[in-house]
Structure formats: C-alpha cells, structure tokens
Image (spheres, helix red, strand yellow):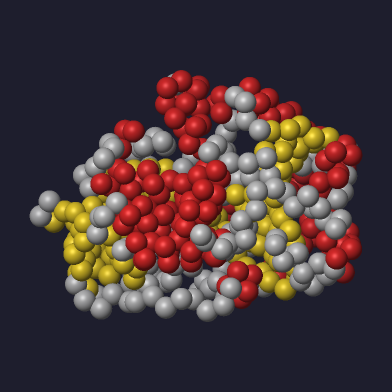
Amino acid sequence: MVETAGNALYLNQNGPEPSWPVLAGPKTVEVAIVGSGLTGLSTALHLAEAGVSVAVFEAHVPGWGASGRNGGQLNPGLKFDPSWFNERFGEDQARSIVAFGWSTVDVTATLVDRLGIDCDLRRNGTLRAAASERDIAGVRRTYDDMRALGMPVDWLEGEALAALTGHQHYPAALLDRRGGDVDPLKLVRGLAGSAARAGAEIFARSRASDLAEQGGGWRFTANGHEVRAAKVLIACNGYADRLWPGLAEASVPVFSSVLASEPLPSDLAARVMPGRQVLYESGLVTVYCRVDAAGRMVIGGRGPMRPSSDAASMGAVRRHAEHLWPALASVEWDYAWNGRVSITPDHLPKLHAPRAGLLIAYGYNGRGVALSTALGAHLAESLTGSVTTETLPLPVSDMKRMAFHRFWPIGVQGAIAASRFRQMIADLF
C-alpha cells in the first residue's frame, strides 16, 4: 500500500506545498543532507548560517514524513528518567545528555522566535499522566528525579488534575511547565524557508541512492544525477532505506495513528483540556492528545501497522477519546492519518559515525519534534569540524541490526495486543 499524507490535518489546513526544485544536474557541495525532516532542515539552516555550502535531498517534499504529520507535541526530555543516564553512561556524560535532552523545547522555541516562524507555538506545559493506579509509582519516580534537579515540574492529583484535563480518569500526573505544542508542518515549512534564505539548497522528489566513498569524500545519485560532497548526514528516521548497510534494520518503523476532530463547540472546548496543556499517557501503548490552536482535539496512538487515512481503522484511538470525554461522541472526526515513528531497541536516539565524514541520526522514539530541531545545531558543528563527534550531546554508537527485523509488524501488533489486554484486565479490578 502506498503511503500518503493526504488526509493529515496539517496538510489540509496549511495549503499547497511550497514549490521546491528537483535536482536537474550534477551537484557538488561541502555537506549533503539526505532527508528534509526537522533534523535535516535544522542542520542545513545552521550550516548555511555558518557559511557552509549545503544541499538537502528529499525523496518526497519537506515534512512529508513524521516531521510534518506528528501529534504536534513539544515534550522535554528523553524516554528515561535523568538518573538512569548516570547509571548507564556515568556522571559526566549523563550530565551532558540530560542538559541537552531536557532543554530541547527551550532551544526550539528560541529558534522559532529568532526566525519569526508562524507555527502556532504555545508553551502551556506537558502532562505525563499515570494511565492507571499501577502507573502512579513510575510517574512519581520521574517527577522526583526531575524535581531533584530543579526542573519546573508539579505533581497533580484529584481535582487539581481534573481541572486541567476535564475528567477524573487519571489518578495522577506530573506537569512539566516547559512543554507545549506546535503545528509541525508549519514548523517544517518555516525551517525550510529559513534554511533556503540562508543559502541552503533544498531538492524535493530527489531520492538519494548508491552512497559510496570516493576521493576522500562521498558520492551518491539523486534523481539520476551525481552528487559529490565532502561530508554527508543521513536523517531519514522511520523512512530509512538501503542507503547505508544495516540502517533500515537498526530500528522499527512503528506506525502511529492520529485523529483530528472538527473544531469543538465553544462549550465543549472549554471542558476538554481547558488549560491547553499537551498530554501523553504512561505505558507501552501510549496515547497522546492536545486541543490545537483551532480548537480541534488531536489525539494519537497505535493503530494499523500499515499506511492508512481511514478513521474506521483507528477505532481504538477514537474510542479512547470518547472514554475520556464522552461528549466527544457527538463530534465529527474530520482527519485521520498515520506515519512511521522510528523506535530503537533501547528507546534512545541514535547517532552513528561509521566512516569519516558520514553522520547518521535517527530514532527519536516519539520525542522528535523538539529533540530533532534542537539537535540540528550540534550536528552542524560536528559536520563543520568545529567539534568532534565525542562532544556531541548524545552518545555516538555503533549501528546494530535488529534480529528478525523483517517480522517487525507481527511483533509490534503482538506487543500492542498484550498491552491492551493487560490494561483491560487492570480496568476490571
């Protein structure tokens, strides 16, 4: 089945894609970037602003993948608590990882403000909700960990939490006041325009293939034309193909499904997420939601592990929304779409430097909007040689193929079914 973003909310409400050129002849640049999502565009912007000749090569159009059709949440942090990184990487490296990982929303907001990008950015905070009583302890540990580092988080229960969500289903949550939301496609288009104005070349419908080292640099083919570059960044996330050996098998491209309602009637909009925080639930099969700047409920979670723009195939997400807010049963769900999120085996983002002059970045595990945007400045510094890969804020690791990767849809569906069954049993008692 061909994947399309045609029924995504953002594509429909933001109008036609800006016109981007297709590569029409050979090209030589200092840095070539494969992938025009937030990682590639942010890196291109910072390189161009530093005076480096850079070109971005995209198989579709900027923002076609997860960068332009995600849930629109700006969430600080990584998948694990800050103290976990001390145990895994040691105090010095953990300090760098945590400082970067929990500052990404601030960095993204500062960049948006500097560039003047109109992308409906709001900073009303992020709620991480315990989906059931058994999840309270885990969310509380996260809160205590963050609070110990002086992070701006609050613990919420009972009426205080219900006042922000509009229901009493969640027993507890932490509120990180740094979080927020954004129209992701507007952010992508704004970054692309800013990068182009700074001097970056962006080529759409110019899929890269046959990457190889040559003459102390790199060469590949895009749209049938040869591209030469001293350095290359591969930033395809959940849409990695065979451009570099093992990359496609190093993560699982899990489909995340999103529904967007019609603009809620004013009385209902005042009762559903009235504080306009974004929210994501604890647990394996996470549900995330927000009411956007137009008053639409945007809610996402796991759906079919195949391309889909059919709301009927995302019934579990809709039913969950109506379980939390029964009045949503009366609204129309105008948009339904899905796309691939890159999930790594250890749930950490990945940076690889398998050869001199080659960087690979992917695996944001559902935290990519702020994380990938903020990462671009650091990747640009590494590609210019002003810092080494060892000083990047996230650890550089060796790429590892996942065993039995070809069976990932079966494994993911099984994990989702098991998690939903455990939640159903828990809800009975």
Is 148 positioned to the left or the right of 399 in the image? right
> 350 or 124: which is nearer to us?
124
Image quadrant where residue 163 sits: top right
Residue 336, placed above or below residue 244: below
Q: Is residue 134 visible?
A: yes
> 302 or 190: which is nearer to us?
190
Instruction: Give the residue displayed 74% in from the left and 41% down from the top.
Output: 129
Q: Residue furthest left?
A: 215
Instruction: Give the residue displayed 31% in from the left and 44% down from the top.
Output: 381
- Locate residue 365, reporting x and y percent: 53, 47
Residue 153, placed above or below residue 13: above
- Locate residue 132, reporting x and y percent: 80, 39
Instruction: Give the residue displayed 60% in from the left and 24% down from the top.
Output: 149
> 389 or 50: which is nearer to us?
50
Is 248 positioned to the left or the right of 4 in the image? left
Instruction: Give the residue displayed 42% in from the left and 62% down from the top.
Output: 194
- Locate residue 425, reporting x and y percent: 82, 43
- Locate residue 311, reporting x and y percent: 71, 70
